[in-house]
Amino acid sequence: MALSEVVRLFRAVQTDPSLKEKYNSAPSLDKLVAMARQDGYDFTTEEWMEATQFKVEELESKLSEIPGI
């Protein structure tokens, strides 16, 4: 069900410029999900990431290994 909710939100945002602006202004993924829940979409942050295949990889190097630092 979460996948269909993410798709429903995606389609709504594509057809409604005010919704697009609203969700693009979310300062974080958690805030976007909270806003979506207030608008009647039922999914979690984890379900959003799974549905959109959004993943954040941690930086595995030390600061001294980054050029210029």
Image (tube, helix red, strand yellow):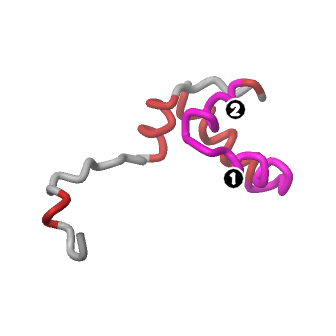
Q: Amino acid at mark 2?
A: Ala
SS category of the residue bearing label 2: helix
Residues at badges 1 and 2 in contact (C-beta under 8 Å)? no
Disc 1 element: helix
State yes or no: residue 55 in magenta: no
Quarter location, residue 49:
top left
Q: Which mark is residue 24?
A: 1
What is the three-letter code of the residue carrying label 1? Asn
Magenta segment boundaries in residue numbering = 14-37
Q: Quadrant of the C terminus?
A: bottom left
Q: In percent of the image, x 55 and y 40: which residue is there?
A: 29
Magenta stretch, main secondary structure, is: helix
In the image, what residue occupies the spot 66% across and 47% down?
Answer: 10
Q: Earlier in the sequence, mark 1 or mark 2?
A: 1
Residue at the far bottom: name it. 68
- How far apart are labels 1 and 2 at the CA level? 12 Å
| Left or right relative to 40: residue 43 | left
Quadrant for the N terminus, please. Answer: top right
Left or right placement of residue 51 versus residue 27 in this view? left
In this rendered view, identify the residue nearer to me: 37 or 28: 28
Residue located beneath label 2 in the image = 36
- Compared to 40, does 20 lie above or below? below
Q: Position of residue 20 (x, y in %)?
A: 76, 53
Residue nearer the viewer, 31 or 4? 31
Vertical arrangement, residue 35 with respect to residue 12, above or below:
above
* Mark 2 surroundings within 10 Å by alpha-carbon count, few (fewer than 14), some (14 through 19), many (20 or more): some
